[in-house]
Every structure is written in structure tokens, then in C-alpha cells.
Image (cartoon, grey):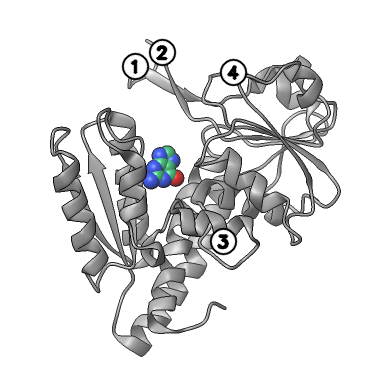
Amino acid sequence: MIQEVGLVTKQLDGNALKQVILDELTTTVDQLFTKYQKRPGLAVVLVGDNPASQAYVGMKKSACKRIGVESFEHLLPEDVGQEALMAVIQQLNQDDQVHGILVQLPLPSGYDEQAIIELIDPSKDVDGFHPINVGRLLSGLPTIRSCTPYGVCELLSYYKIETEGKHVVIVGRSNIVGKPLAAMLVQKETPGNATVTICHSRSKQLKELTTQADILVAAIGQPGFITEDMVKEGAVVIDVGINRVSDPNAQRGYRLVGDVEYESVAPRSSAITPVPGGVGPLTIAMLMKNTVAMFRRSLDVPAV
Ligand code: GUN
């Protein structure tokens, strides 16, 4: 599963781990169905017609189908309005068949995103974005973990990449990736116990910070932002970016690239995630894991 790409660099295969996780979840969902005659339900709400968001929603739907989770899609027009969107969330909060609610972000301009996040019942907040769940994470209490940073942690565990005592430098301070990942890796747990630095667009001497990283995480949303000179020899490089860049030679007219300039950085690193096929598939896998965990909680069946 670990592919050699160069003399020493290992490619961390997110698709392979996704399959392992989804296989396990399929068995769990089958067993729970046999016992309780109920299935987990995930509601996905998409406002507008952003093509990337539509693609993600499609992937989420097929992952649900693959593991036997019911999916409820709410595809709303861009001009649906804040109040109507809030009414949809309130209705999903009340719906016993729905165990997880995901509102695809970003919402189109004009929406109060935070008000929507805070309206979701924290026990159905499958993204872990509600301030109650964010606060629980920071406090080291059991909670739902945001899917992308949770996926990064799973990838590090699966490939037995030690984090204890290591310097993890995260480039990007978003609520979706940078901040929750820092909160996870600093906890007294495994993976965790890391020294964590978050840098961002206003950080000075960025290169001096990134070259200190034993594990460098790029989550800034800029294609090829991390170049060879920003990476310490032998570092582990985790690329969270998924950027569409136009490519007239590609069938769809674009190709996906990460935040890391892969070709130059890979030979310097001891392990690296590709884009696509690295962290991206794990976001979906962890969404499924969270949905099943919330379903178990609703049945009062403890996590295994
Ligand atoms: N947009 C990009 N990543 C995510 C995510 O993990 N959850 C939601 N809801 N929207 C996103």
C-alpha cells in the first residue's frame, strides 16, 4: 500500500485507507440493522450550484449508499434565503431518521453561515463545527471531530507516523482544517502530544517556520504554495489542498492540484500525500464514521 516514489519517499494512499474504513463501517451498519432494524441517516444541505460543492455532495451520497446509510439531499436554490434555510435545519433537527446534518460550506454570499452552524443540534453536528463541539474538542472531551482534520489524524495513525514530541507546522488557520487539526494534535492522546505551530497569510518569515516542521500540513487553498525550499529534508508532508486549475488538455478542462508543489517537494520528504488520492478520500470516510457514531449514540450503543 505504501508506494515508493523516489529513493526514500513514501506516498500515503488515502484511497486505500478509505476502503478499509468503509469496509469496517459496512459491517457495523449491517450488524446494527440486523439488531435494531434501523439505519443511520445523513442529511446533506447544498445551497446554490457551485460545481465543486455539487461534486462533493455526489461523493457523499455514493459513500452513504456504499455502506448502507440513508442519505437525504436538500438541494436548495441560491436565493432560497436565510429564513427558509433555517426552517430546513429546524425540520432536520426534529427528524428521527436523520442522525447527522451537513450544510455544505461555503454558503453563497449573503448568508449568515455561523447562525446556520449554531442552529444545528450539536448531537447531529456531523461536521463538528458547532461551538459546543469545538469547545469540547479544545477541552479534550469526547466529541464529534471535523472530518478533514480527523482524516489527517487517521492517515498518520494508519501509516504509523509518530506525532509525539514532533513539531507539526500547519499552514492555514481555517475553522474547517487548521484550527481543529491543531487542537487534535496537541491533545494528550495518540496521535497527538505534538508541538503545534499554526501559520497563515499574515505570518512573517513563513519559510523559517515551515522548514522547522517534522510534519508539514498545507491547508491554505493556494495551488502549489509550498515549494521545495519551504520543506525540511525528510519531513512528512500532508497536502490538504484541493484546487481546480484550468487545463485545456484535461477532459473536464481543469485538473486538481494540492497546496504543495508535489514534483519538487516529494523527493525531499520522507512521506507525502498525493492530490487527488491523499487526504480528500478520508474526509468522506470520516464523515461516514461520524454518521455511524452519531447513530450509535442515538441508539445508546457505545462506540467500539
Ligand atoms: N466545505 C469544505 N470542507 C467541508 C467540510 O468538511 N464540511 C462542510 N460542511 N463543508 C465543507
Separation of marks 3 and 2 at Cα, in angstroms: 43 Å
Disc 4 versus disc 1: distance between alpha carbons?
Answer: 19 Å
The response on whether ligand 1 sits within 8 Å of label 2 is: no
Q: Residue 181 placed where, x, y %?
A: 62, 46
Look at label 3 and name its amino acid: Arg
Quarter, ligand 1:
top left
Q: Earlier in the sequence, mark 4 or mark 1?
A: 4
Q: Which label sits in the foreground, 1 or 3?
A: 3
Left or right: where 19 falls relative to 171: left
Question: Is the Cβ of the residue at disc 1 closer than 8 Å to that at disc 3?
Answer: no
Q: Amino acid at mark 4?
A: Gly
Q: Position of residue 284 (x, y in %)?
A: 44, 50
Label 4 vs label 3: CA separation?
A: 34 Å
Which residue lies at the image location 21% right of the left edge and 34% below the top edge?
A: 48
**Tag of residue 224:** 4
Q: What residue is at 64 percent from the left and 60 percent from the top?
A: 139
- In depth, the one of 167 and 157 nearer the eye is 167
Whether label 1 touches label 2, CB < 8 Å: yes
Q: Relative to 185, does residue 108 appear above or below in the rendering?
A: above
Q: CA distance from mark 4 to mark 2?
A: 15 Å
Q: Which residue is mark 1?
A: 253
> Which amino acid does the dot numbered 1 rest on?
Gly
